[in-house]
Every structure is written in structure tokens, then in C-alpha cells.
Amino acid sequence: MHSNIAQSGKGVPVILIHGLGGNLTSWDVVAGKLAKRFRVIRYDLRGHGDSGNPRGPWSLDDFIEDLASIVKQLSLEEFHLVGFSLGGLIGQGFTLKYPDLVQKLVIVSAVAGRTEEERQKVIERVKNLENGDLDTNVELAMERWFSPAFRNDYPERVKKRFDTLMANDPQGYLNAYRVFGNGDLAQELHHITCPTLIMTGEDDPGSSARMSELMHRKIKNSRLEILPGLRHSVLVESPETVVSKIDDFL
């Protein structure tokens, strides 16, 4: 499968994995700062942006192996890995499968240890997509992703994220959503031994502080950052805060 890749900067490689319904431009602010001292590698996930969109269904391992193919293509031996949301789940899975390749791991706004109620909410959103009801999911997403004040004060930034979501292929988005909805590696996270930074927004209802605290307990060599006042889309609401925490950690 073809993966669309962008690179900038020099130094130790840092791979950035975007979230569901995004693309590699989700990392523009973060990549701009990190490229001052790292070789920053970004790519579009399958079914997103300008990467391939193979026929589904897909599995989490498909996303992990897409990344493994990029690592092989670029002849990378060691690197730092940073994942947001679905990208954070992929980062967890990749580090578990290829522990010798990842020097440091950063998990941003990701899921682990969903309750049955939380799992049912995601299944309901998948069913909405299967029934062609994208609008309901998008409105619910905007509520989860952005604080009311941010939506009111920065409508153009919210619209840009909305437009990025809507530009993705609907079937690819559905295939990826199924993987996101079914993916949960909480029971395996204790096997991760590399230094790990775990971050989420204090008010993120889907990738909650409780989930990040669980990851922090499971991953012994980890640091936890709960970002005050933020919901899910921390890369849009406060990218400067996120990149400052990542840059300091790396």
C-alpha cells in the first residue's frame, strides 16, 4: 500500500501519527518546532489524505504494518514515536510489536481500558456511519473535540478541522473507525518498557484522564500530563502546549 510521507529537519528521527479523520497536516505546528532538532517524519494513515485506501475490513495490525513498511522504506533503525488518538493506539501497538525500534514513545489523547458504556458509545457511532449518518457523528465529534469557548472564539480553526475530516473517503473513514472502536491494548501495556509520555485533555470525554492515568499505571517508565481545560483536539486548541511538552520529553 502507498503511504504519503513528509519529512523535515535533521537529527534523531521522530515519527508523528495523526488521528482518525485527520492527515499529516494535523502536526504542522508540532513538526515545525521539532524539526529544529529532529528529523521529523509524518505520513497519512491508510484511507486518509493522499495515502492508499485498500479495501476493508482493516485491523489494527494493518496500521502497525503500514508503519513498519515506512520504517523499512526509510531504513530507520531507532526513532521516537508520537501518536495522537488513533495514532496513539497505533503507537502502543507498534511499540509492543517492535520494542527494539522505539527509543521514546509519546501517547496523546488516546484510549485504553474503555468501560462497557464507553465501548457502546463508540459502537453506536460506527452504526451511524454504517447507516450513512455522518452528520450526527460530526456534530458529536465537534462537541467532544472542542471546548464551547474555543468553538465560539475560533470558528475558523474548528471549520478547518471539520473540512479535513470531510475530505476523507467515507468508506476509508468507516474502516478506520471500526479499528478505533474495537482497539484496546490496556491488558498489554505493561510490556512497554521504553520511556513514555502520556498526555490528554482534562475535559476529553472519549480519551479521558482516567484512561491516561490507567496507561500511566500500566507503563512503569512513564510520565503523565493532564492538560487543563482542553478536550480532544489538543493539536488544534493548544498545539504550542503539546509541542512544548513533547520537545521537553524528547
Image (spheres, helix red, strand yellow):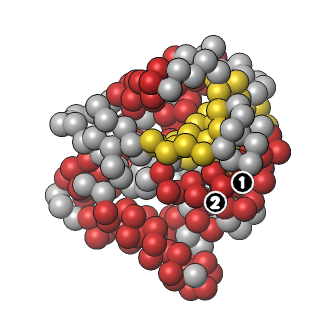
Q: Residue at x 61, y 18 (%)?
A: 77
Quadrant for residue 119, please give it.
Answer: top left
Q: Position of residue 218 (x, y in %)?
A: 68, 27
Residue 80, image quadrant? top right
Quadrant where the image shows the N terminus: top left
Instruction: Please tell me how crowded label 1 is: few (under 14), some (14-19), or many (20+) other residues with Cα within 10 Å.
Output: some
Which residue is at the far right? 248
34 with respect to 46 (left or right): right
Locate residue 195, reporting x and y percent. Answer: 75, 27
Identify the residue at horizontal 45%, vertical 41% (top origin): 5
Name the residue tied to disc 2.
Answer: 29
- SS for callout 1: helix
For the point 77% across and 37% down, the residue is 250
Q: Nearer the viewer, residue 118 or 190?
A: 190
- Viewer-side residue, 173 vs 78: 78
Asked if disc 2 and disc 1 are in contact, CB closer than 8 Å, the reply is yes
Q: Look at the picture and state if 68 lies above or below 164.
A: above
Q: List x then y, in percent, for residue 97.
A: 52, 17
Vertical order, 53 against 189 (above or below): below
Viewer-proximal residue, 189 or 56?
56
> Hey, what amino acid is under mark 1?
Lys
Which residue is drawn at the image coordinates 33% and 49% (left, top)? 50
Residue 54: quadrant of the picture? top left
Is residue 210 shown to the viewer in this render? no
Numbered circle sitting on residue 33: 1
Whether residue 131 can be seen here: yes
